[in-house]
Amino acid sequence: MLPRPAVAAAARALVVALPLALAGGGCATNPATGKPQLAFFGEEAELNMGRDADAEVVATIGLYDDYNLADYVDEVGHRLAAASERPYLPWSFKVLDDPSVNAFALPGGYVYVTRGILAELGSEAELAGVLGHEIGHVTARHGVHAASQQILATVGVGVAAVILDPDHADEWFDVGTLGLAVAFLAHSRSDERQADDLGLRYMLRAGYDPQEMPGVFEMLEQVGAAEGGHLPGWLSTHPDPGKRRLRMSQAVTEVQARGEMPTSPRVEREAYLRRLEGLAYGPDPQLGALRDGAALHPALGFRVQAPTGWSLAGNPKGLTLRPPQGGASLVVEVSEEASAAAARDAFFGKKGIARGEEWDGDGGVRWSRFTSARKSENLAGTVGFVEQDGQVFELMGVAAASAWDAERQAVEEALTSFGALAGGDDIAGDRLALVEIREPLPLADFATRYPSTVGLADLALLNRVEAGGTLSADTLAKRVVAGNR
């Protein structure tokens, strides 16, 4: 599973490591299977790439701010990693502040789960199944193998094309230019099956109940069905979760038949759910929210007017607005430069960007129109830089050159509305709450008795029942409420 920011983050680390990789190429032994494996990357290069990409992932997506939950996930992860073929790696297990249902791993032992997938899981053993699968990708060096294969096909073809600004990947280049980076983290169907098998192996070794693993795929299947059949955060190479559930169920049956089940298999359902009390659910409004026609970013303290009908995506570095039909973007984010002038120079110092008309706006903003050359259709846009509360912000609107004139007025009006948030613009987000159910209770009655900010469909997913189903007695049920912890 792989979010787009991780692709861009890993891309930069991968290209930096390419000279070392090519110099030390050859075959190696797969640590998890003992079979020969193509690997241009030695273990030192693997560790360096993972460490560099980890820094990018954390900076781009952000960590979820709950130390107790982070320590818990890290503890479970290390329990499984200790049962793997590579226990000596500098394993790291982190919770990302991302509402999507996702998990992924980087070479070298860097494993991530989102708060979105934690909300949907139902036990510690299910969490172990997710982490075990990702550990399997690392122990079998799937990312290193895939990148090595891709190098054979791309050496001599402008590999440095992936060294682009990851924060504007959608605006500056197509996913196709990240082929090598995607290969670094995307996995074949056979790799996914092998990671499933390894995850089951590590669950057994660590004493977890393997019967919980098929439940993970059942959850993914339900989430995918709720989102029109598209698994959020998954690349197209992932096998169908329904087929994986059946395959894992068969594997567990075979484990039972061989008498290999742990003596007291660990599930920890209630203990896991208790850990979720107060977990942020859904998009974090502190990282971007639409309110009364304005796009707000409370964490960074700014707001802009949103063009009518445009959607918003936020992250720790800023936010992006896009129209329903696509083809244009409005981006506001923090620059790494020390001043507005330095940020402007850095922007126009990029290859292929040409400066156009310029003018001074309110608040000391120097606005510039620009064009950017690309292989398909050139881009056109407007950009400005401003300093506010000790931070430098880049304000940019961009579209295909042929569409820019139609979008320009609405985009520039939004950009020039940039300003500081008022005190009342701090927004509380939704969070998970738990209810002890003593007797069987229809989900519809549960929703009436214990109101949630989400509908029956979401409550059904969270509690693994049908929308018209019934919650079991003597269990903890999840609901979603508004407000801070």
Image (cartoon, rainbow, N blue to C red):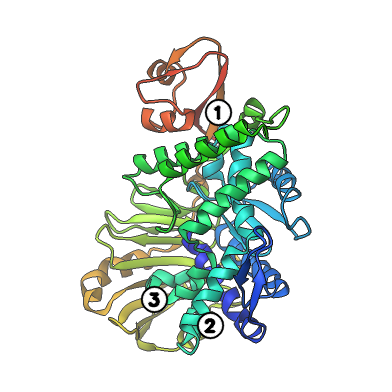
* Vertical side of 189 occupied by 396: above or below: below
Residue 180, given in percent of the width and then of the height, sits at 49, 75
Comparing labels 1 and 3, the label whose residue is closer to the camera: 3
Name the quarter where the C terminus is drawn: top right
Q: Amino acid at mark 3?
A: Phe
- In the displayed image of the protein, which residue is found farthest to the front? 258
The residue drawn where x is 47% and y is 48% is 100
Q: Which residue is mark 2?
A: 341
- Of helix, strand and loop, which one carries label 2? helix
Q: Tally the marks.
A: 3
Q: Amino acid at mark 1?
A: Ala
**Which numbered marker is on residue 433?**
1
Distance from the alpha carbon under mark 2 to that under mark 1: 47 Å
Q: Is residue 302 left or right of residue 212?
A: left
Q: Earlier in the sequence, mark 3 or mark 2?
A: 3
Q: Is residue 168 left or right of residue 261?
A: left
Q: Would you say the residues marked 1 and 3 are in contact, meaning their CB atoms lie under 8 Å apart?
A: no
Comparing labels 2 and 1, the label whose residue is closer to the camera: 1
Q: Which residue is mark 3?
A: 173
Q: Amino acid at mark 2?
A: Ala
Q: Is residue 388 left or right of residue 78?
A: left
Residue 98, given in percent of the width and then of the height, sits at 52, 50
Q: Earlier in the sequence, mark 1 or mark 3?
A: 3
The reply to whether residue 277 is visible in this rendering is no
The residue drawn where x is 68% and y is 64% is 108
